[in-house]
């Protein structure tokens, strides 16, 4: 039955993976790790999940910066260290690596200290 559905195009893991990644990268601005993990949780083969994520139109830093810039205004009333902590934590929860998350949070909040201590 499954083979028949695949043959007529009703079951297509690659198409599903591409749509899933497009949605997660586009509307949720998730990082590559989060998208790969989500695809794997949905039953997509690890090699296909990685291949689809590597074809993303934007790079990781651009997506992280877009999310950071969208969320930074909500944190303006907080002390800079707390705002930095919250924003970088959000980015890491969304699947961005610590370096990318911290750099994007620092830029979005217009913090100057390059050593990571805000």
Image (cartoon, rainbow, N blue to C red):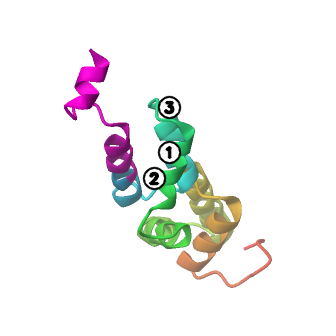
How dense is the environment of label 2, judged by Cα within 10 Å: few (below 14), some, or many (20 and up)? many
Front residue of this view, candidates 57 and 82:
57
- 47 relative to 96, above or below: above
Q: Earlier in the sequence, mark 1 or mark 3?
A: 3
Residue drawn at x 45%, y 52% as measured from the top left: 52
Q: Is residue 100 part of the magenta span, yes or no? A: no
| Spot occupied by residue 49 in the image (x, y as percentages of width and height) | 50, 45
Task: Name the disc covering residue 71, or none.
Answer: none
How dense is the environment of label 1, judged by Cα within 10 Å: few (below 14), some, or many (20 and up)? many
Q: For mark 3, give the secondary structure.
A: helix
| Spot occupied by residue 21 in the image (x, y as percentages of width and height) | 40, 51
Left or right: where 8 falls relative to 44? left
Q: For mark 2, give the secondary structure.
A: helix
Which region shows up in magenta? 1-21
Q: For mark 1, give the secondary structure.
A: helix
Residue drawn at x 35%, y 55% as measured from the top left: 22
Q: Spatial distance from mark 1 to mark 2, Cα to Cα?
A: 5 Å
- 47 relative to 118, above or below: above
User: Mark 2 sits on what residue?
Assistant: 52
User: Mark 3 sits on what residue?
Assistant: 41
Q: Earlier in the sequence, mark 2 or mark 3?
A: 3
Q: Spatial distance from mark 2 to mark 3, Cα to Cα?
A: 15 Å
* Quadrant in which the N terminus appears: top left
Image quarter of residue 113: bottom right
Q: Spatial distance from mark 1 to mark 3, Cα to Cα?
A: 10 Å
Front residue of this view, candidates 108 and 57:
57
User: Mark 1 sits on what residue?
Assistant: 49
Front residue of this view, candidates 58 and 66:
58
């Amino acid at each position: 039955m499954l083979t028949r559905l695949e043959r007529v195009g009703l079951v297509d893991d690659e198409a599903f993976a591409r749509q899933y990644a497009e949605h997660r990268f586009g509307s949720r601005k998730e990082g590559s790790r989060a998208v790969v993990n989500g695809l794997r949780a949905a039953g997509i083969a690890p090699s296909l999940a990685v291949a689809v994520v590597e074809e993303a139109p934007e790079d990781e830093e651009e997506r992280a910066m877009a999310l950071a810039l969208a969320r930074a205004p909500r944190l303006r009333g907080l002390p800079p260290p707390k705002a930095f902590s919250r924003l970088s934590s959000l980015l890491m929860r969304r699947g961005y690596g610590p370096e990318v998350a911290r750099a994007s949070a620092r830029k979005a909040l217009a913090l100057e200290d390059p050593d990571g201590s805000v």
